[in-house]
Amino acid sequence: MTYPLPRGANFRRAKFLWEIGLDVAGNPDTPYGGNRDMCVAVGNGSGEAFRPWLRMATGSPILLTDVIGGGIEMSMVNPSGFLTQAYRGVGFWKSPMPVRMIAMYPSYDRFVFMVNPKTGLKSLKDVKDRKYPLHVSVKEDVTHSTRVFIDQALSYYGFSLADIVSWGGKLNLTGAPNDKRRMDALADGTLEAIFDEGLVTWLEPALKHGMQLVDLDKGHFDYLAGLGWRRVVLPKGKWGSSHDHDCIDYSGWPLYASEKLPDQTAYEVAKAIAAREKQIVWEDEYEGLREVFTETPSSPMDVPLHPGSAKFWKEFSARG
């Protein structure tokens, strides 16, 4: 598919550099934590040094400190719950951070804990009580949002992944949710548990190989809600689920900035999203710009829109 570009040779050159960056960062042999993120900089390159005006990057949840510190102007985080924590000053963040949402890339997802019933484990509490040496599959990047969330969730019962390893357990480390290392261990029966998101890629095979969804109790959900995590339902039939299952919302990829970002800059970025909507690669369930600027199941918004973005959306939606 060929996407229309702004007029001028300069933008063909920019697209040339963009495609190079995508391929280099997208090398499948690069592990999580390696050179697989990108920073897009818009600025003035007419002199002896490039003078950035707007820098936007992908990266880990803690990249937020670079946004607040002025190293970059905007970043994206997955999922929305981590921006909520920063805004409220809970969980990973010890005090409220001055962040605002520019827009949301809508992405519907859930986080679940799965265990093979052959272990005899019926809850996460059982893992702690029995000091069970669990063979569990998790992301390999220790700064990945899922690794932070897992330790937050397990802390309710007073243990961590490190404790599981100390009890003789083993971590099956993966990159993508359907990493070959996970799927092979699942198929050969050596894997006992999976704690992860990205369910569209691995939940159905896990269920077919005998894994079962672990229920969390009300007190646990209340504890996680205090850290900014929403209790939601994985509906029966979704990705192979045999029943409605209460779990944690892992939806939404917010684009965020410091609250001090000039209103006009936020307005221009929001306007650009609308202008290039047909060129952006959205997820299959995408339903339109309403999901980008307002609350939907794919766009949980517990952080206010930046005033510049809010102004754009008010004007845009008023046009009908």
Image (cartoon, grey):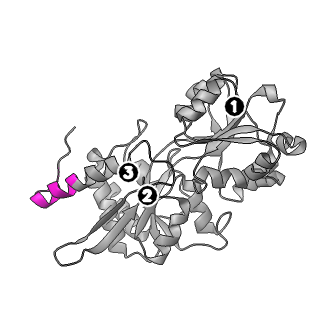
Q: Main secondary structure of the magenta part?
A: helix
- Which callout, 2 or 1, points to the residue nearer the camera? 1
Image check: 291 left or right of 227? left
Q: Estimate the spatial distance between the alpha carbons at disc 2 and disc 1, rounded to whole Å.
A: 31 Å
| SS for dot 1 | loop
Quarter in which the N terminus is drawn: top left
User: What is the x, y in percent for residue 259?
Assistant: 47, 74
The amino acid pointed to by label 2 is: Thr
Q: Residue at x 43, y 76 (%)?
A: 70
User: What is the x, y in percent for residue 174?
Assistant: 57, 41
Q: Is residue 180 rendered magenta in the image?
A: no
Q: Are marks 2 and 1 in contact (CB under 8 Å)?
A: no
Task: Give the mark, 2 or 1, whose residue is nearer the N terminus.
Answer: 2
Residue span colored magenta: 5-16
The amino acid pointed to by label 1 is: Leu
Quadrant of the rendered image containing residue 158? bottom right
Image check: 27 left or right of 64? left
- Which callout, 2 or 3, points to the residue nearer the camera? 3
Q: Is residue 8 visible?
A: no
**Residue beneath disc 3:** 25
| SS for dot 2 | loop
Q: Residue at x 70, y 28 (%)?
A: 190
Q: Are marks 3 and 1 in contact (CB under 8 Å)?
A: no
| SS for dot 3 | helix
Image check: 176 left or right of 247? left
264 and 175: which is toward the camera:
175
Q: Would you place residue 169 above or below residue 268 in this image?
A: above
**Residue beneath disc 1:** 191
Q: Is residue 11 rendered magenta in the image?
A: yes
Task: Give the mark, 2 or 3, whose residue is nearer the N terminus.
Answer: 3
Q: Estimate the spatial distance between the alpha carbons at disc 3 and disc 1, rounded to whole Å.
A: 30 Å
